[in-house]
Image: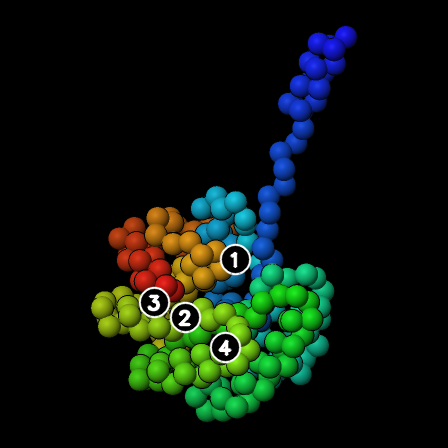
Amino acid sequence: MLLAAALADGEKKKEAKPAAPLFRHVLFIGNSYTSSHDLPKMVEGMAKVAGLPVQLRVEADVTNGATLEDHWGAPSARDRIRERQWDFVVLQEQSLRPLKNPDRMEKYARLLDAEIRKRGAKTVLFLTWAPEEGPHAQQELNRAYYRIADKLKALVVPVGPAWARVRKERSMLKLYTYDGSHPSPAGTYLAACVFYAVLTGRSPVGLPAKVAYGGDKLVELKPAVAKYLQKTAWKTAIS
């Protein structure tokens, strides 16, 4: 009887479904810098293909041209923050607001951060890149984002500094589209690698040059280019 019971128990264990994967839930709030080439899903796709023990589940609330002030004034961003238990909420300011009015950027980052904290989540600041024709602006962007991050005890994802490295080392590698502002596929891939590094604490080196999610191709680079961008992202994230 004991042997039969043990065998039956063993059969039940064989039939048991594998444990559901663990997830970190991430909400991106921003504008077309975030939505270009679907940066949030690219980050999620990288974590998925890497087979991490804790996966990323991402959602986004994006409006073209929106500032953090615009997101605060509209109900959707605050509703999204309140709708679930997030692990990280990413805030991306409009590209010129940190240069022209950093005080207003800080005001609305603080207001959104207060809502994020109520949900027990961590605020993450998406440090963006300087315009193609004004690379000198990167230092000012860095100061604005890091000053606010220090006050809010927020994480910073240093995408702009990673872009600056690439522009210095490989100026022929196109990170911008024709408008000199928005990211090319390579630019979004680099941004996704930096996000992957910061949100997972792991190096993106070794990730595939083709990143897909849900069967849809998001980006495909030459392997050598992808490897260089991965190394640059990791170097920037840990510096």
Circle 2 or circle 4, nearest the eye: 4
The disc at residue 149 is 4
Question: Answer yes or no: do the residues labelled 4 and 1 have beta carbons within 8 Å?
Answer: no
Give me the C-alpha separation between circle 4 and circle 3.
Answer: 16 Å
Q: Secondary structure at mark 4?
A: helix
Q: Residue at x 31, y 58 (%)?
A: 231
- CA neighbours of label 3 inside 10 A, class few (<14), some (14 to 19), many (20+): few
Q: State the residue at coordinates (34%, 67%).
A: 239
Q: Which mark is residue 239?
A: 3
Does label 2 or label 4 sit earlier along the sequence?
A: 4
Location of residue 79 by image quarter: bottom right
Circle on res. 41: 1
Q: Mark 2 and mark 3: span between their CA atoms?
A: 10 Å
Marks 2/1: CA distance? 19 Å
Q: Badge 2 is on which residue?
A: 158
Q: Nearer the viewer, residue 76 or 178?
A: 76
Label 2 amino acid? Pro
Badge 2 element? strand
Spot the residue most to the front.
2
Q: Earlier in the sequence, mark 4 or mark 3?
A: 4
The residue that appears at 43% across and 75% down in the rendered structure is: 128
Residue 62 picture location, percent across and down: 58, 71
* Viewer-side label of 2, 3: 3
